[in-house]
Image (spheres, helix red, strand yellow):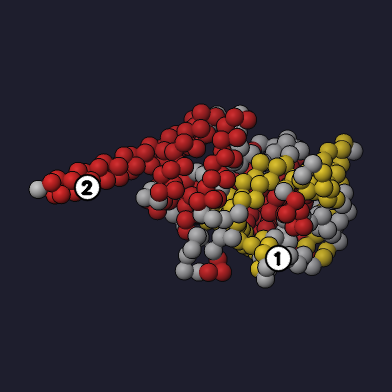
Amino acid sequence: MIRIHPGYVKDSEGLSTLSTDIEIDGEKTNVYLSVEPQYGKFLSPERADYALIGLLAYAMRHGHDIICEAPVTEELLYNIREILLPTLVRSDSRSYHTKIQADIAPPLKKLPFAVGKLGAVGTGVSLGVDSAYTILKHFNSVYPNQNLTHLCIFQNGSAVTADPLINEKIFEHAEAVAKEFNLPLLKVESNVKSFVKQKHVASHTYKDVLIMYAMQKLWRVYYYSGGYSFSDFSLKNNLYTATAHFEPFLLDCFSISNLRIVPSGSEGDRDDKINFIIDNPIVQKYLPSVCLSRLTAASALNVGARFWHSTRRINLRITESHSTSTNISSNEKESTSI
């Protein structure tokens, strides 16, 4: 049995921190996430939504039911109980059909992130190909209400590595990229990666959505950069396989009327994304060095190969652009001297 206690917010050492105590078969643990003080008002301890989402996969793998001492948003609980759990269990017989005990409540109201502005639109800035594609597609697009208002970096395993020096570089680049696009950067520090032991590839979507719901008073739309196309969708062996294969289904179940979590990039494949971003000067400036840093830390050969392929193509295009620029410059000089 898993028991999720009510969350609480504490301001200390220049950070606002949302903490939630959790009991798993009597053993106590705690999940927390911290943000800069100006974002503290968006933390959402009034609902157990975030902790429930973060523990779902773990509960299904280990045969746990869940008791929430704080209420859960009605639409979210409906989606989880009536759609997500039955579908995942039916598609993988090893899954336990977790029972959830919780009171229901309406969605939390959005708070203004700027004067007269409610409901932010965000995405992560991990600085890989998928992230770059999402940012460029939703920055100053022809759809003003769908355009990005914030970039984010979550310290939960998706954007960080085991090497603190590499992490420092990734965070520095995230701040630089946010400045290039003139968008605020929301930085979230947390123990979401480790508060319960889970294989990252089989749980990262749940962890990321946990953080979105922990700040549900901020978000109206969140674009989640996917690594696979819709054509790769599969629920087979979903208990232990990478959640990326059925991410669109998860994100749809985790979306509610005032918080849409949109799978971005799943409409194409990796080459489509590279072709979309490859000529952007910001991408050319930052993506190669970040990919190479993360390539150094990559533990899986296929992950490293994907980073290498992306970096090589971007670097080749930079070289081509530089060569073209140099030739044009030379021709202009020759024309001037004639």
Side of 149 relative to 22 (left or right): left
Side of 98 relative to 240 (left or right): right
Q: How many marks?
A: 2
- The residue located at (72%, 42%) in the rendering is 190
| SS for dot 2 | helix
- The residue located at (72%, 54%) in the rendering is 39
Q: Position of residue 324 (x, y in %)?
A: 25, 45
| Amino acid type of the residue that numbered disc 1 sits on in the rendered structure | Pro
Q: Is residue 249 above or below residue 19?
A: below
Q: Position of residue 291 (x, y in %)?
A: 48, 37
| Amino acid type of the residue that numbered disc 2 sits on in the rendered structure | Ile
Q: Is residue 46 visible in the rendered structure shown here? A: yes
Q: Residues within 10 Å of mark 1 (few under 14, many from 20)?
A: some
Residue 255's quadrant in the figure?
Answer: bottom right
Dot 2 or dot 1, earlier in sequence: 1
Q: CA distance from mark 2 to mark 1?
A: 49 Å
Q: Quadrant of the N terminus?
A: top right
Residue under pointer 2: 328
Q: Nearer the viewer, residue 201 or 317?
A: 317
Residue under pointer 1: 112
- The residue located at (62%, 46%) in the rendering is 153
| SS for dot 1 | strand
Residue 315's quadrant in the figure?
Answer: top left
Q: Is residue 161 above or below residue 45?
A: above
Q: Nearer the viewer, residue 338 or 197?
A: 338
Q: Is residue 301 above or below residue 23?
A: above
